[in-house]
Image (spheres, rainbow, N blue to C red):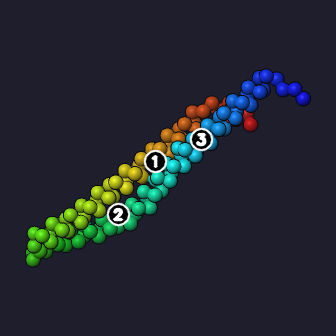
Amino acid sequence: MHQSPYCKIENIQLRKIKTRILILLLLVVMPGFLASAVCAYYLIPEWATLTASYQDYRRVSESPSATEKEILIAKTAQEIHRINCFAEGVGLLLGGIIVSIGIQGICILPQKYIDSN
């Protein structure tokens, strides 16, 4: 059976669209999701450590017998965990932005070719 040239062009365009979707999923959406998942995995225990470190800092700073060195050590420890939580949170948000860019790229592809098959 002979296909019209218009059908051949439409099939080529459909394959291009499906290839673009696959590329966006593999190179944008999945890495963004993976980055967010990894950052969330490390953020959760770091948040718990920050909470414990901050409580230790409060306990030491409110103690009348604490030396300046002990207070400085406790403050530095909680600031280290605070910076780590910030960095992991930024990574989580950036991964989410990358995912949303990929999904938006998939959504703006011409819909008539996606729906035809």
Q: Quadrant of the C terminus?
A: top right
The image shows residue 18 at horizontal and vertical percentages of: 66, 38
Badge 1 amino acid:
Gly
- Secondary structure under the numbered disc 1 in the rendered image: helix
The answer to which image quadrant residue 81 occupies is: bottom left
Q: CA distance from mark 2 to mark 1?
A: 19 Å
Q: Mark 3 or mark 1: name the one nearer the start of the chain.
A: 3
- Secondary structure under the numbered disc 2 in the rendered image: helix
Does residue 33 appear left or right of residue 66 in this picture? right
Mark 3, residue position: 23
Instruction: Name the residue located 61 percent from the left edge and 37 percent from the top edge.
Output: 20
Does residue 30 appear left or right of residue 85 in this picture? right
The image shows residue 61 at horizontal and vertical percentages of: 15, 69
Mark 2, residue position: 47
Of circles 3 and 1, which is in front? Answer: 3
Q: In this view, which residue lies farthest toward the top?
A: 5
Instruction: Name the residue located 26 percent from the left edge and 61 percent from the top edge.
Output: 80
Badge 2 amino acid:
Trp
Q: Mark 2 or mark 1: name the one nearer the start of the chain.
A: 2
The image shows residue 13 at horizontal and vertical percentages of: 69, 30
Mark 1, residue position: 96
Does residue 93 appear left or right of residue 102 in this picture? left
Q: Residues within 10 Å of mark 3 (few under 14, many from 20)?
A: some
Instruction: Name the residue located 41 percent from the left edge and 62 percent from the top edge.
Output: 42
Q: Residues within 10 Å of mark 2 (few under 14, many from 20)?
A: some
The answer to which image quadrant residue 45 occupies is: bottom left
